[in-house]
Amino acid sequence: MAEDLINSFMTGPDENGRFGDFGGRFVSETLMPLILELEKQYEFAKTDDSFWAEMNDLWTHYVGRPSPLYLADRLTEHLGGAKIYMKRDELNHTGAHKINNVLGQIILARRMGKTRIIAETGAGQHGVATATVCAKFGLKCVVYMGAHDVERQKPNVFRMRLLGAEVVPVTSGRGTLKDAMNDALRDWVTNVRDTFYCIGTVAGPHPYPAMVRDFQQIIGKEAKAQMLEREGRLPDTIIAAIGGGSNAMGLFFPFLDDKSVNIIGVEAGGKGVNAKMEHCASLTGGRPGVLHGNRTYLLQDDDGQILEGYSISAGLDYPGIGPEHSWLHEIGRAKYVSITDKEALSAFQLCCEQEGIIPALEPSHALAHVIKIAPDLPKDHIICMNMCGRGDKDIFTVAKHLGFDMAEAD
């Protein structure tokens, strides 16, 4: 048993919040007591049956879990190779995987006596999930969102406001997810007494990367059981898109010790992984550094200054990645690739046409890599990709890039 734990990929982080050389806690003195209290409360909650009973009840009756594992038969036939399954977390309440984690953090916040919840958001899905759960429990909600993302994700901004959240446009930097997270951290330092910061991805200071992963691994646990029921065996390959990487870690984590399963994370390649950094592929085009309280791979210049990066997808438009992904990359347990805007848009359209599913731009990146590799794989090869969000929020962005005038559609 002890030998199994030593050889397991599922034991991290260590007592210092590290996955190998990545992770840790790089925060101000003001925040350190809050971080330590959060860690203490989460460690207690993890072993508290009543905590998980409440989580499971809400996952089942509020979120709508388990989400289906769907055989994309027309897409499989169209590509002529591997059998393609989609883990359909876009069918969750609020339309994405984000609510899996938000429920856990806000239940924890309530146990800690916090009455004000703050969050950052890029695509708006984490913001919508946070606003939704705050509305359910009667908590004040403030969501920081880059001004650029406010403009390109208008449907989600309206949804957050309908749910009673205050949406704060962030104009610093390029007005995207990195800048929103900067302002959320500044808010937290200022309002330590009553405020809980609900981080939306597997990044930030310890214990956030592990805590968010733990809440999201419901995706992989379900997919594993569903695949065994449907096919009598595990998939050969699992694939998910990565910005910070919570939907990917959620799918990957339960499979890490299954050596027969290939694991592929798909980063945003933007206009191409090039010297101009017109992409957000931090593992492909970045190097280790410190941002938002943890050490991980980042897009940065020669002086260590964080670069802005670029992606058509607001949810992937982040110049870093969760530290556990950096560790999996360095030890070679997972493979990380990049997909361009053009490839993601093509996958978006093909999914609509072949399966009657309008995907978000984030999982469209993962699907684009499926489309790239499936035709060359044998028909008995099974791929499971995480359809982590639906595309309602992206229709204006896609229409613009496809040259369709939404105003004329009236």
Image (tube, rainbow, N blue to C red):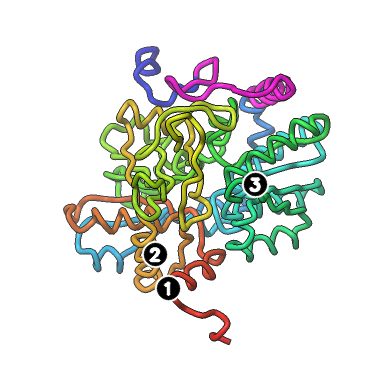
**Tag of residue 368:** none
Q: Which residue is mark 3?
A: 172
Marks 2/1: CA–CA distance = 9 Å
Quarter placement of the N terminus? top left
Which amino acid type corresponds to the residue marked 1 in the rendered image? Leu
Instruction: Give residue 134's position: percent from left, percent from top.
Output: 75, 48
Work out whether mark 2 precedes mark 1 in sequence or the reverse, and give the earlier one.
Answer: 2
Q: Secondary structure at mark 3?
A: loop
Pick the residue in front: 332 or 134: 332
Residue stretch rendered in magenta on the structure: 14-43
Is residue 1 one of those drawn in magenta?
A: no
Q: Which residue is mark 1?
A: 402
Work out whether mark 3 precedes mark 2 in sequence or the reverse, and give the earlier one.
Answer: 3
Q: Of tags 3 and 2, which is closer to the observer?
A: 3
Picture quadrant where residue 281 is located:
top left
* Residue at (50% x, 26% y) in the render: 295
Is residue 38 one of those drawn in magenta?
A: yes
Marks 1/3: CA–CA distance = 29 Å
Q: Which residue is mark 2?
A: 345
- Residue sticking out furthest to the front: 303
Above/below status of 297 relative to 236? above
Instruction: Give residue 132's position: percent from left, percent from top.
Output: 70, 53
- Residue sticking out furthest to the top: 2
Q: Answer yes or no: is residue 279 visible.
A: yes
Pick the residue in front: 145 or 148: 148
Q: 63 left or right of 236?
A: right
Q: 73 left or right of 294?
A: left
Quarter placement of the C terminus? bottom right
Which amino acid type corresponds to the residue marked 2 in the rendered image? Leu
Q: Secondary structure at mark 1?
A: loop
